[in-house]
Image (cartoon, helix red, strand yellow):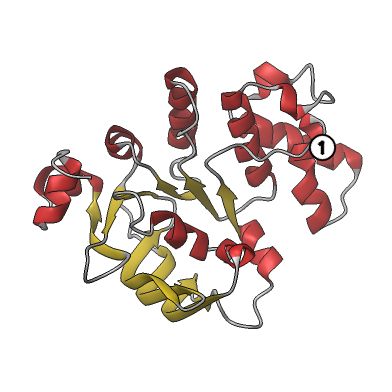
Amino acid sequence: MSKLVPAITVKNFNFYYGHIKALEGVSINIYQNQITAIIGPSGCGKSTFIKSLNRIAELEGEVRVEGKLEFFGQNIYDRRVNVNRLRRQIGMVFQKPNLFPMSIYENVAYGVKIARWCPKAELDEIVESAIKAAALWDEVKNKLHKSALGLSGGQQQRLCIARALAVKPKVLLMDEPCSALDPIATMKIEELIHSLRGELTIAIVTHNMQQAARVSDFTAFFSTDESRIGQMIEFGATSQIFTTALDERTRDYVSGRFG
């Protein structure tokens, strides 16, 4: 196995919404071209953590951070960081599809158009390539100029992934991407994640233990208790977390004894 290179390095990271601490002392490497699952009970800080990685949490209010959070060696929270550029490099797919009320084509082209001008022929290629990468092309190739809102929930979610892929991100964050989907649509998203393995760095928040075990290379378990909020309890190879976790709280959670 080739040497693992961190795409995102987190060390002693604390995160605050206003004066409220949401994450405490998180340290983790999210490795390049690997899939990292983030698991844990509701309210433990999983979504807050993933939204801190591309600063999208700032859209929800005033935030403050302490500690180290770097993207290929660059401080993500440096004042000089271009946040729009950062979010193109670290894309995000949310729990529910958040498509624009426009055509399938325009949804995928949207981010590319904002980032730069390119000839229509090139834009056509980018859109087609992204939709193919999201395993959706055969289903939508004959209706690219129809409303994206007419697609099924699973198709909409894959189109959101295509939109994120179109701007060529280095990292893709996924916050419960299958929670609103039926089992068949969920299977297609998981197959898509598998197809992107090795080409893209992916961090996925999931409540589904079987999904975490199926799709990820590494797993981080977050939890909280009365004395400490939003802490990462354990991180390791997924096979180790699910079979020989070091911390009793991790073993209890992945075996279904709590959470």
Specify whether 228 is left or right of 186.
left
Q: Is residue 36 above or below residue 191?
A: below
Q: Determine if residue 169 is in view.
A: yes
Specify whether 111 is left or right of 33.
right
Secondary structure category for the residue under label 1: helix
Identify the residue position indicated by label 1 in the image: 106
- Tell me which residue sits at (77%, 50%) in the image: 112
Q: Is residue 192 above or below residue 89?
A: above
Specify whether 147 is left or right of 87.
right
Q: Position of residue 117 (x, y in %)?
A: 88, 54
Q: Position of residue 191 (x, y in %)?
A: 45, 28
- Tell me which residue sits at (63%, 21%) in the image: 152
Q: Position of residue 129 (x, y in %)?
A: 69, 34
| In front of the other: 198 or 153 | 153
Quarter occupied by residue 232: bottom left
- Tell me which residue sits at (56%, 63%) in the image: 57
Q: Amino acid at mark 1?
A: Glu
How crowded is the residue under tag 1: few (<14 C-alpha within 10 Å), some, or many (20+)?
A: many
